[in-house]
Amino acid sequence: MLSKKMEDALNEQMNREMYSAYLYMSMSSFCTNKGLKGFANWFMVQYHEEMLHAMKFYEYINHQGGRAVLNTIQQPPSEFASPLDMFTKTLEHEQFITKSINELMELAIAGKDHATRIFLQWYVTEQVEEEGNDNEIIAQLQIIKDNPQGLMMLDRELASRMTTVPTEFSKGVEAAIKGTPAA
Ligand code: FEO
């Protein structure tokens, strides 16, 4: 059972996850247009991960007797100065998401909502991984600076990122809710 306050906060987070997907899809399109196929792949994989994050909220809210309510998704930026600019914005966005997950966790603890607290634990762990990935790529881009050869080498490396989101989406959501490594 969810309190109304918790249900509303979870719905807001579902929207933020969808915005995250939208943001990374926009970055992927930008990279494709600039001939950076590996970067485009990395952001498209990230798009799929974010949609899974959103769907987990959708499933959880409805399973707990609430109602997932879809809201307007904010328009993401479509122009970026450089790959470093994109990853700096990605990290800033993920830090914002980490903060909002922490606030949800505090709400669950204050409301003695242990089911939601356990559900949110997956996101706490996921955010550590996401920020870590972004920090790693930012560090590489800072070394590369304006070296096109270095940029193309990193582009090739990022081309190998594969999605961990199963093609059978509903099974992926089910597994993620149970905490098994589907994403
Ligand atoms: Fe769903 Fe990138 O956090």
Image (cartoon, rainbow, N blue to C red):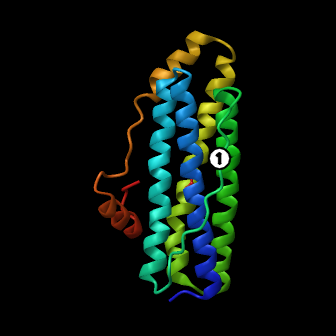
Left or right: 116, with 6 as reference point: left
Q: Give x and y (percent) for residue 42.
A: 48, 35
Q: How many marks?
A: 1
Residue 162: x %, y % from top left: 38, 38
The x and y percentages for residue 63 are: 42, 81
Could you say which is closer to the camera, residue 51 or residue 149?
51
Neighbour tally class for label 1: few under 14, some 14-19, many 20 plus, Cα within 10 Å = some
Query: In the image, is 174 to the left or to the right of 123?
Result: left
Q: Residue at x 47, y 29 (%)?
A: 158
Question: Which kind of residue does numbered mark 1 sit on?
Answer: Pro
Name above or below for residue 79 compared with residue 113. Answer: above
Q: Secondary structure at mark 1?
A: loop
**Residue at the (67%, 26%) spot, across then down:** 82
Q: Quadrant of the C terminus?
A: bottom left
Which corner quadrant of the figure contains ligand 1? Answer: bottom right
Q: Is residue 123 left or right of residue 161?
A: right
Compared with 97, 34 (above or below) is above
Q: Residue visible at 65% across and 47% down?
A: 76
Q: Within the image, what quadrant is residue 10 found in?
A: bottom right
Can you say whether 44 is above or below 3 in the image?
above
The structure residue drawn at horizontal position 60% and vertical position 11%, both measured from the top left corner, is 148
Residue at the spot of label 1: 76
- Image coordinates of residue 87 in percent, x first then y, are 64, 36
Quadrant in which residue 136 is drawn:
top right
Q: Nearer the viewer, residue 78 or 122?
A: 78
Q: Quadrant of residue 133?
A: top right
Work out whether residue 115 or residue 49 is closer to the camera in this orientation and state it: 49
